[in-house]
């Protein structure tokens, strides 16, 4: 089998700027304004007492929903770090909100073996919708917790962060399997579905292996499958899943210029994002709104409710809907192409703008605009915008010994362009 990346694909043609900040002052100001508005969601749509962040909010009316998401809360904790660094909120106010959040997570929010339930009442923390103790959503929350631990360098924040992270019993989740379950409920036990194919799972396995208290065995990293997709002559590791699977782990873990025995996952996401752009553009005859200036489909709201869609290959009832977080969450991978899309949305579709940046989705062909923003989609946009601009989230999060240990156990090593060819034979064997 040929290597996953040719030298041309992997290190030249698809390599984005090697250092953050390689964008114009106009684009930097645009992202500054976008991040500032994104942050308002996490500040205003969270309970000041619990720190939990709403899963979503209606921006066209007075939102009265009470469903919080632990994943949105993880993005929100990271957003507070960015906001404090950028001066959107004072150090004192940011520290107080983080402390209250961590204290609530540690003392009051229900858990099972350290894993948090996916959805909770934003004001009380009570589990809602019979939701599962979620493995991957807990991982997203932990990424936010660890980011705060490093950013604030505060004794109380550090102690609470350690306590929350060390309580998670990864060995329980992996007692009978190397492939982790999606979660557990008191009513039914473990969810049968396993994290078995490339997706946002990377953060979860790396955190588990990096745990000092209940570590995953290294076999877990090698157990999940890395399917190879090919489109328009480009080859990459992928899944039959929306674009966000290439984004979420990379919001915190810095995969740039390093690889395990299988791939450079940063370049892999660069290629996968470019493939998705080409896929959307080639749908232009069917959906005339799609172009190089307007593309991007990932799991989102639609006129028919929440839809898991994307491609290639095409999945879901694609209808010309555009999802801003598809490009927003891919900013570090294809800066020029994604910024072009975000500028187009802002300049030509005022109905897609809102107090918190962009609504979750809109359809230029039908004139439909979502009424809601969704926390995880607003979050991935804000974090990736900051990573493109400064690398701040990567730099801060990767100071954590847990992150460093997880990547070391998985076998990540720095590499040069020349070593890609030297590793090709090993890559063929491992696939």
Image (tube, rainbow, N blue to C red):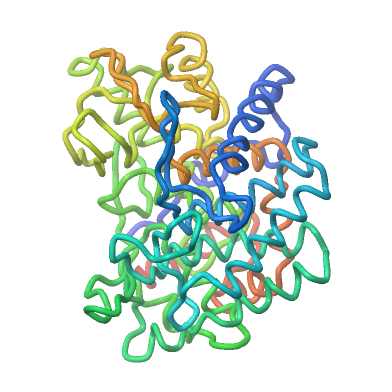
What residue appears at the point 76 percent right and 62 percent down from the top-left corner? 150
Residue 265 in view, yes or no: yes
The quarter of the displayed image where residue 166 is located: bottom right
Q: Is residue 53 left or right of residue 95?
A: left
Tell me residue 96's x, y (percent). Answer: 75, 55
In this picture, residue 206 sits left or right of residue 397: left
Which residue occupies the extreme bottom position in the image?
175
Residue 59 located left or right of residue 355: left
Report the front residue among 90 and 150. Answer: 90
Q: Quadrant of the N terminus?
A: bottom left
Q: Nearer the viewer, residue 146 or 46?
A: 46
344 w.r.t. 384: above or below: above
The image quarter in which residue 2 lies:
bottom left
> Is 174 placed above or below 34 here?
below
Q: Seen from this angle, which residue lies furthest top?
A: 348
Instruction: Report the residue at 38% width, 71% height from top.
Output: 133
For residue 109, above or below residue 420: below
Which residue is found at the position 26% from the left and 44% from the top? 308
Is 285 placed above or below 77 here? above
Q: Residue 256, percent across and down?
A: 62, 53
Residue 81: x and y in percent read: 72, 49
Q: Residue at x 20, y 25 (%)?
A: 319
């Amino acid at each position: 089998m040929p290597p996953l990346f040719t030298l041309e694909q992997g290190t030249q043609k698809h390599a984005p700027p090697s250092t953050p900040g390689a964008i114009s002052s106009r684009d930097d100001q645009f992202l500054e304004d976008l991040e500032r508005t994104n942050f308002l969601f996490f500040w205003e749509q969270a309970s000041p007492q619990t720190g939990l962040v709403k899963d979503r909010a209606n921006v066209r009316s007075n939102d009265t929903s009470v469903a919080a998401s632990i994943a949105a809360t993880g993005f929100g904790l990271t957003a507070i770090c960015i906001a404090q660094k950028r001066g959107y909120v004072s150090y004192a106010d940011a520290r107080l909100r983080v402390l209250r959040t961590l204290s609530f997570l540690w003392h009051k929010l229900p858990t099972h073996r350290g894993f948090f339930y996916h959805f909770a009442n934003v004001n009380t923390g009570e589990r809602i919708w019979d939701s599962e103790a979620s493995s991957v959503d807990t991982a997203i929350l932990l990424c936010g917790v660890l980011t705060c631990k490093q950013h604030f360098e505060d004794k109380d924040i550090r102690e609470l962060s350690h306590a929350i992270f060390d309580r998670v019993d990864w060995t329980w989740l992996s007692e009978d399997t190397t492939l982790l379950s999606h979660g557990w409920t008191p009513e039914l036990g473990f969810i049968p579905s396993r994290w078995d194919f490339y997706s946002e799972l990377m953060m979860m396995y790396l955190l588990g292996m990096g745990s000092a208290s209940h570590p995953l065995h290294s076999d877990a990293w090698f157990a999940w499958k890395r399917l190879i997709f090919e489109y328009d002559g480009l080859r990459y590791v992928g899944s039959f899943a929306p674009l966000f699977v290439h984004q979420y782990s990379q919001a915190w873990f810095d995969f740039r210029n390093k690889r395990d025995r299988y791939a450079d996952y940063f370049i892999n996401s660069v290629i996968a994002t470019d493939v998705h752009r080409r896929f959307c553009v080639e749908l232009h005859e069917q959906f005339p709104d799609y172009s190089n200036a307007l593309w991007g489909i990932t799991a989102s709201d639609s006129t028919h409710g929440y839809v898991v869609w994307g491609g290639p290959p095409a999945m879901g009832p694609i209808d010309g809907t555009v999802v801003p977080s598809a490009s927003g969450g891919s900013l570090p991978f294809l800066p020029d192409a994604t910024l072009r899309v975000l500028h187009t949305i802002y300049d030509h579709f005022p109905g897609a703008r809102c107090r918190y940046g962009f609504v979750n989705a809109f359809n230029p062909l039908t004139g439909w605009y979502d009424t809601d923003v969704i926390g995880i989609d607003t979050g991935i946009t804000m974090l990736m915008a900051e990573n493109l601009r400064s690398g701040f989230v990567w730099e801060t999060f990767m100071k954590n010994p847990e992150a460093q240990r997880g990547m070391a156990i998985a076998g990540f090593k720095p590499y040069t362009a020349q070593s890609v060819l030297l590793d090709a034979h090993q890559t063929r064997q491992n696939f």
